[in-house]
């Protein structure tokens, strides 16, 4: 299968490209990046061709593309790729507005191409095991969720609202909202949030607490932030606690680690040894395209997660809950 | 007038208690002895008007108990006292505070009101409190309290009332300071959620009208919904 990559603006592009290189049936046929220096550098690293021009890149003979641009460019690239009949894996958040996300979904449907949202946390082993436990009824009925997704401030275009669409709350809400929707199979109907900027001297949010209610009465809390500093032992977390009528179980996508102590400014590091969820995501996307099946994580999944994150901003501004 | 302390006896750290403890008011021979009694409204009523120095948990307080000394569960835990010291070192604490408690089914929402009292004295006056809870008839009952303390601190306080072992998790994500506590990962042989009688007496607050009104206000918010 021939796959191309569109933009390395998002750091996840590197691990997705690493994933492509590990799959025996996949060829990385080219990289489009209009940041020429960056594009040439990664093309050299992955032994492929760099394209400055999107049109000539999309004219290539290839099955699919992976889009890792700045958030505000997802729409443009998804629509162009769909019109060129390429299947698409799009980095999260799928877009910066719900209307853009819907348009992207419509164009992909019209052109009969796959649009998968990149939610790699679904491929974390602990997250999948917990999903199996829920499906097997081990937890009973779900009563509540507690989730977190905290990390470091990525800087760059992430802290420019024009390009990112939002700060930590947008960046770090969509993953766990997707996991909760996946576990429960229900939609969120109410969002209450406090969004603020505490940790960095930046003109965009870096902290947020969300309280959610699902259509069946299940309640949830979520902590989204860029509160982790470089000396913290690990980049961050992606955790969930599921409170069930029979049992309460926790999972953390970054929990599988050993502690390493060294002499220096960062004395303690958590060395992660868990499964490579980015590889899991890429393999799933490749299989989906190969088998011609519906993606496991759809464009609509991306839209519904985006909708909740954007509602959090609205709730914080209004200082009241927002109904979806 | 000796001290009479009402407490859950399984919460008492006898090793850390330095005061002389007796098991009943009748055995209280000396002024400096402290009678330690299990939680009982009947026992409390029996000693309430006898000019005793009484210490009760906030969950037992009602309007009739003005003048007694009230202590707060959370405020007495040694881990919380240390965490408080660290947070208080910051001039104006700024960050995200998360508290998660698993409590027995017999505990009430008054525990949440008590926590709000303790935390507002640490993190600032509450500007907005939102309460979200599950259907109380379907166990476990779960409550999420979202608090905006203003001035740069937000908090989630979460409570599950169930038959699981009691536990507390606390996290503070501050500016260049992150604190994490989980009672389940502490001492594996002894319960970690205990405190001394000395701590109860030293941390207690006189139940005046201001305290009662404040606690009632928090209690109404928790029981009645959003503010």
Image (cartoon, coloured by chain):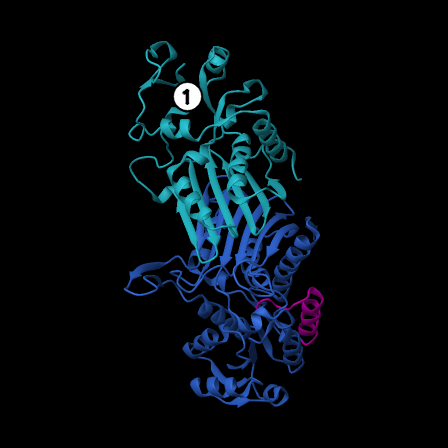
Looking at the image, how many numbered discs can be counted on the residues?
1
* Quadrant, the N terminus of chain B: top left
What is the x, y in percent for residue B47?
46, 12
Q: Is residue A109 magenta?
A: yes
- Front one among A308 and B131: B131
Circle 1 sits on which residue? Answer: B5
The picture quadrant where one finds residue B220 is top right
Q: Is residue A235 magenta?
A: no
Q: Is residue B199 above or below residue A157?
A: above
- Front one among A237 and A121: A237
The picture quadrant where one finds residue A74 is bottom right
Q: Is residue A172 above or below residue B84?
A: below
- Front one among A265 and A91: A265
Residue pictured at 58% horizontal, 69% vertical: A159
Residue B140 at least partly seen: no
Residue pictured at 59% horizontal, 64% vertical: A167
Horizontal side of residue A243 vs B38, given as left or right = right
The picture quadrant where one finds residue A51 is bottom right
> What range of the chain is rendered magenta?
A90-111
* Quadrant, the C terminus of chain B: top right
Chain B visual colour: cyan
What is the x, y in percent for residue A121?
49, 62
From this viewpoint, which residue is outermost toward the front?
B91
Residue pictured at 35% horizontal, 29% vertical: B196
Numbered disc 1: what chain? B
Residue pictured at 63% horizontal, 80% vertical: A81
The local secondary structure at tag 1 comes to: strand
What is the x, y in percent for residue B180?
41, 49
Residue B221 at least partly seen: yes
What is the x, y in percent for residue A307?
66, 59
Chain A visual colour: blue
- Front one among A152 and A80: A152
């Amino acid at each position: 299968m021939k796959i191309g990559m569109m933009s390395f603006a998002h750091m996840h592009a590197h691990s997705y490209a690493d994933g492509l290189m590990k799959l025996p049936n996949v060829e990385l046929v080219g990289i489009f990046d209009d940041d020429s220096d960056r594009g040439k550098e990664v093309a050299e690293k992955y032994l492929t061709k760099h394209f400055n021009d999107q049109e000539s890149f999309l004219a290539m003979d290839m099955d699919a593309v992976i889009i890792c641009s700045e958030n505000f460019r997802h729409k443009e690239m998804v629509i162009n790729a769909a019109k060129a009949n390429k299947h698409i894996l799009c980095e999260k958040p799928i877009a910066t507005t719900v209307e853009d996300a819907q348009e992207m979904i419509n164009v992909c449907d019209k052109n009969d191409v796959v649009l998968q949202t990149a939610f790699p946390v679904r491929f974390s082993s602990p997250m999948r095991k917990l999903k199996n436990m829920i499906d097997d009824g081990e937890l009973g009925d779900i009563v509540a969720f507690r989730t977190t997704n905290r990390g470091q401030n990525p800087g760059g275009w992430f802290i420019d609202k024009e390009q990112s669409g939002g700060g930590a709350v947008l960046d770090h809400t969509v993953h766990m909202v997707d996991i909760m929707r996946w576990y429960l199979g229900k939609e969120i109907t109410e969002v209450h949030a406090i969004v603020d900027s505490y940790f960095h001297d930046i003109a965009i949010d870096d902290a947020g607490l969300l309280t959610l209610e699902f259509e069946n009465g299940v309640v949830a809390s979520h902590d989204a932030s860029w509160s982790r500093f470089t000396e913290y032992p690990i980049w961050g977390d992606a955790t969930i606690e599921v409170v069930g009528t029979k049992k309460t179980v926790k999972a953390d996508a970054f929990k599988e680690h050993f502690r390493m102590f060294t002499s220096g400014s960062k004395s303690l590091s958590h060395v992660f040894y868990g499964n490579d969820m980015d590889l899991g995501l890429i393999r799933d996307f490749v299989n989906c395209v190969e088998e011609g099946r519906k993606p496991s994580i759809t464009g609509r999944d991306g839209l519904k997660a985006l909708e909740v994150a954007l509602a959090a901003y609205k709730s914080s501004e209004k200082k009241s809950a927002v109904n979806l | 007038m000796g001290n009479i302390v009402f407490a859950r006896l399984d919460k008492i750290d006898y090793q850390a208690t330095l005061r002389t403890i007796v098991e009943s008011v009748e055995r209280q021979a000396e002024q400096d002895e402290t009678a330690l009694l299990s939680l009982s409204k009947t026992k409390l009523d029996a000693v309430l008007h006898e000019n005793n120095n009484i210490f009760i948990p906030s969950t037992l307080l009602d309007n009739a108990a003005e003048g007694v000394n009230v202590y707060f569960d959370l405020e007495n835990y040694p881990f919380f006292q240390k965490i408080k010291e660290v947070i208080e070192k910051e001039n104006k604490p700024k960050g995200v505070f998360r508290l998660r408690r698993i409590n027995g089914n017999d505990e009430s929402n008054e525990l949440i009101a008590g926590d709000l009292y303790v935390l507002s004295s640490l993190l600032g006056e509450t500007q907005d409190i939102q309460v979200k809870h599950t259907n109380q008839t379907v166990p476990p009952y779960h409550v999420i309290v979202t608090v905006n303390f203003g001035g740069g601190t937000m908090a989630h306080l979460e409570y599950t009332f169930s038959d699981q072992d009691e536990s507390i998790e606390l996290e503070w994500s501050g500016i260049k300071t992150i604190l994490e506590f989980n009672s389940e990962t502490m001492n594996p042989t002894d319960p970690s959620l205990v405190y001394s009688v000395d701590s109860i007496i030293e941390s207690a607050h006189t139940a005046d009208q201001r305290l009662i009104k404040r606690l009632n206000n928090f209690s109404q918010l928790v029981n009645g919904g959003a503010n």
